[in-house]
Image: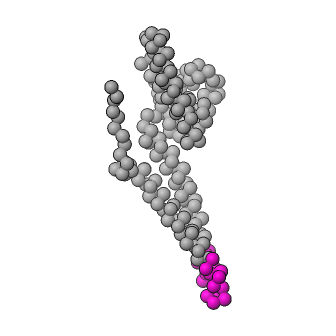
Amino acid sequence: MGLDHLQEEQQATVLKIRKRVIEAIGRNMDLYGVTLSTGHLYGLLFFADKPMTLDDMGREMEMSKTSMSTGVRTLLDLKMVNKVWSKGSRKDLYEVEYDWHQTFTDYFAIKWRKAVESNLQILRKSIEELNRLVEGLDEQADAELIHILMEDKHKVLQAEAYYKWLDRLIDTMENEEIYKLVPKEEIKEHS
């Protein structure tokens, strides 16, 4: 529902509250690698009562259509905004994705999974190299080097164990088992 039907003072009060929330959202969007202005754009869409075009957003935020387009593309890539269809409209319309749990999962699962796979591959290759080095050494003559290599292997194995744990954590996010361990908060209306 738009604010047009409200009295000027009522509109100002609602806009003040919304602005505070939008500012907070904007400041925290760097967690997702998003600029402050793109975070503000997300906040604008969050409070929109209907899907918006780039022109609508540009007017509201007093930004160029190019800036709006870049921001919306970023939010689309992060699955924080959805493109929607409206009968009779030839312009693209956008609305915010309200399921923040899913947005968090989509973003971090993808980022973390890439890091996990890359790092596990490197760690496993390093473990193989350390094993080959140790196998080719003389226990008596190379005792000090073997000790260093075994300490390094222990550290690499610790890192590997962490990435295996992180991989399982990502699995619990993707299959939603995480919500059995850390349930979603129920929405409680305050009086």
Most frequent secondary structure within the magenta stretch = helix
The magenta stretch is 128-148
| Residue at 57%, 69% in the rendered image | 155
Q: Nearer the viewer, residue 139 or 13?
A: 13
| Residue at 60%, 72% in the rendered image | 152
Q: Nearer the viewer, residue 60 or 9?
A: 9
Task: Tell me if I can see residue 51 in this picture.
Answer: no
The percent position of residue 9, horizontal first and vertical second, equals: 47, 12
The percent position of residue 107, horizontal first and vertical second, equals: 51, 45
Answer left or right for 176 relative to 25: left
The percent position of residue 59, horizontal first and vertical second, equals: 59, 19
Question: Quadrant of the rendered structure where residue 142 is?
Answer: bottom right
Q: In the displayed structure, would residue 117 be above or below residue 150?
A: above
Q: Nearer the viewer, residue 67 or 29?
A: 29
The percent position of residue 119, horizontal first and vertical second, equals: 57, 61
Q: How is the image coloured?
A: one colour
Task: Tell me if I can see residue 153 in this picture.
Answer: yes
* Residue 173 is a magenta residue: no
Location of the N terminus by quadrant is: top left
